[in-house]
Amino acid sequence: MYGLSGKRIWVAGHRGMVGSAVARRLESEGCEVLVAPRDRVDLERQADVERFFDENRPQAVIMAAAKVGGILANDRQPVEFLQRNLSMELNVIKTAYDAGVEKLLFLGSSCIYPKLAAQPIEESALLTGPLEPTNEWYAIAKIAGIKLCQAYMKEKGARFVSAMPTNLYGPNDNFDLQSSHVLPALIRKAHEAKLADLDHVTIWGTGTPRREFLFVEDCADALVFLLKNYEDYEHVNVGSGNDVSILDLMTTVAEVVGFTGRIETDPSKPDGTPRKLMSNAKLAAMGWRPKTDLRQGISRTYQWYLENLGR
Ligand code: GFB
């Protein structure tokens, strides 16, 4: 429905884990990938965004720029997660419309859904119940982004659509133990425990919550698929369709990394939402499937970590 060949496509957030994976995935599409150097374009300054559009004239935009983080970062920095994400979204989405962008794909997250939504979570569950308190700030910002795209579609006929990825992981992830998401944190913890020959590793919370994970290169493939083929009003879940308890995840990570010590829990840290497995039926019905299973993805991520950060 939307051919990418020969198009100028701006990947906003190109240095991040998702943005860099999308830029790599677009290399085989015969398009021109535009990137905005962070030292010259501050997405929180509308004038910078307007100048970038004037100078580069993108025909399509993948909005993968965001202030992101794990459960502790979200819980401790509500202003950062709400204000900065709203600011970037408003600037990019409005300026894209004003500049006549043909198509825009906005990225949200599975945390937009109610804390206790029925599982697997259908797209229609949005706004049907209270959010998970630890990340309601980020969730509200992402819900606002979905709604702004829908407003432009409804009132202006803009082809601005939204995708909701599940918990992502992979090369170029953030491995800082205070601000990262769970999977990179567990890889780093197991790696450092192995190097230090520790007899145990500690995970946050009780280990009982369940999380769905998608390898970031599969996510990038899904996002390009949606940019080409999706034009509807409602957002689309992008997930693997399988979830795992945090404790079982740590067990798998330990096996891949080669750590043989005990796994201990730290209930003083938050568990967050008990489960957030999304339904991937809508995307599957369009013919898209992920290729990388969890153990393969963890192994490839650990390999990247060793080659880039683990020294
Ligand atoms: O990826 P994560 O930090 O965030 O996962 P969410 C948190 C879950 O993993 C909680 C447990 O149950 C934590 O108790 N966990 C165990 C750990 N050990 C660790 C650890 O060392 N580090 C971390 N980070 N967690 C995020 C949202 O929710 O999901 C974001 O806050 C975004 O906004 C993201 O939506 C996709 O999965 O709970």
Image (cartoon, helix red, strand yellow):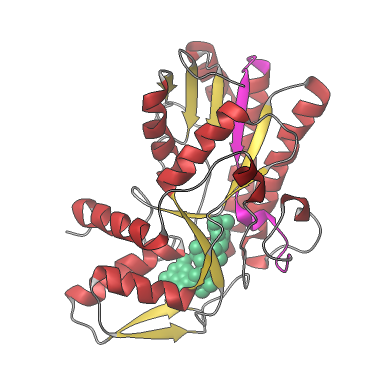
Residue at the (29%, 54%) spot, across then down: 300
Q: Is residue 175 visible?
A: no
Residue at the (38%, 54%) spot, across then down: 174
Q: In the rendered view, does 159 fall on the left or right side of 52?
A: right
Residue 194 placed where, x, y %? 21, 75
- Count of marks overlaid on the render: 0
Viewer-closest of 261 and 290: 290
Residue 265 placed where, x, y %? 44, 84
Reply above or below: 194 against 49: below
Quadrant (top left, top right, bottom left, bottom right) of the N terminus: top right
The stretch in magenta equals: 98-117
Q: In the rendered view, does 145 fall on the left or right side of 55?
A: right
Residue 32 placed where, x, y %? 41, 18
Viewer-closest of 17 and 122: 122
Residue at the (46%, 36%) spot, across then down: 13
Q: Can residue 193 be seen in this view?
A: yes
Reply above or below: 76 against 139: below
Quadrant (top left, top right, bottom left, bottom right) of the C terminus: bottom left
Is 82 one of the magenta-colored residues? no
Image quarter for residue 25?
A: top left
Reply above or below: 286 against 291: above
Viewer-closest of 41 and 248: 248
Residue 245 placed where, x, y %? 51, 74
Q: In the rendered view, does 138 fall on the left or right side of 223?
A: right
Is 99 one of the magenta-colored residues? yes
